[in-house]
Image (tube, helix red, strand yellow):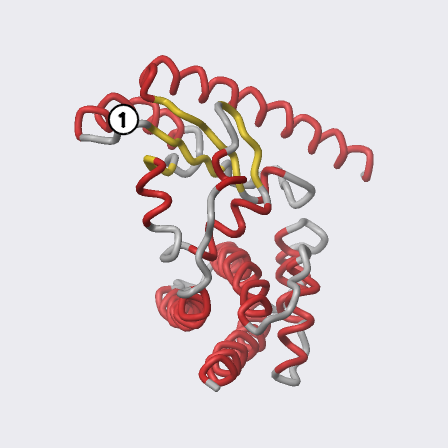
Amino acid sequence: MAAQGEVGRSEARMDTEKDLIDLVGRLKQAAGENLRAVVLYGSAVDHDFREHSDLNVLCLLHRLEGADLKSLRAVGWWWWRKGHPPPLLFTLVELQNSADMFSIELLDMKARHRMLEGADFLAELEVPMVQHKLQVERELRINVIRLRQSFLRWRGGRSDLAELLIASASSFGTLFRHALIALGEEAPKSVREAAERVARLVTLNAEPFQRISDLREGKSAEGELNLEALLESYLDLVTRVAEEIDQRLAS
């Protein structure tokens, strides 16, 4: 079974590389000299890659007016139809001017990215930390609210609930790391370790997050878990973390 898993991951990697090469080729053809750089970021870059990991791509352009956006629409549609998020489109000036508002996202991009085309602009990008604490507080609260709303929309299907938990844990994993950064600590690369550390702040067990991570990574199956009970304990954990981080950063 382990060997089959390795073969599956290897095949997924090969498919990923083909998709990325094809994407860059299409972008160059559509944008021409307007294309400045293309970067892959997120879990698909390194060891956190899974067969169904999103291929998150940012395209840097010299200019980004209506006509330029129109020229890229066919590429964006093709990429989305393949199951990937549409590329993020920025000019360098836009990225620099908005770096303080997207500190969480850009810090993660700087730490984990791979250039597919052009020079590594992220290595030179300065990310101001003035708004970082506020963004962490806000995103923690927003994601708790979204989790509650998503549960209210849940129609009772186990697969839907599993997908809800996995998507939520992916967001909170990032926020746990940045909560530690906001508190002046060095954040671990592993979201599991980050979850353990923030759980200790609120004297709760990180097990709900870890069990959802096992589900995401294929280490456990939906049928092995009481998903509703898992949601309850997980919601208690993330709510308490949001409250504690809010109080600590306010003081």
Q: Which of 97 and 205 is in front in this view?
A: 97
Residue 9 rendering spot, x and y as whole percentages: 69, 33
Which residue is painted at 39% across and 70% down in the image? 138
Which quadrant would the N terminus be assigned to in this image? top right
Q: In this view, does 56 lie above or below 234?
A: above
Where is mark 1, residue-wise? 73
Which residue is painted at 56% across and 20% down in the image? 18
Q: In this view, does 245 lie above or below 64?
A: below
Amino acid found under the numbered disc labelled 1: Arg
Quarter of the image for residue 31 reads: top left
Residue 45 rendering spot, x and y as whole percentages: 61, 38
Which residue is painted at 53% across and 74% down in the image? 238
Q: Nearer the viewer, residue 199 or 211?
A: 199
Residue 75 rendering spot, x and y as whole percentages: 34, 23
Which residue is painted at 64% across and 56% down in the image? 215
From the viewer's perspective, tell me whether residue 64 is left or right of residue 125. Answer: left
From the viewer's perspective, tell me whether residue 174 is left or right of residue 186. Answer: left
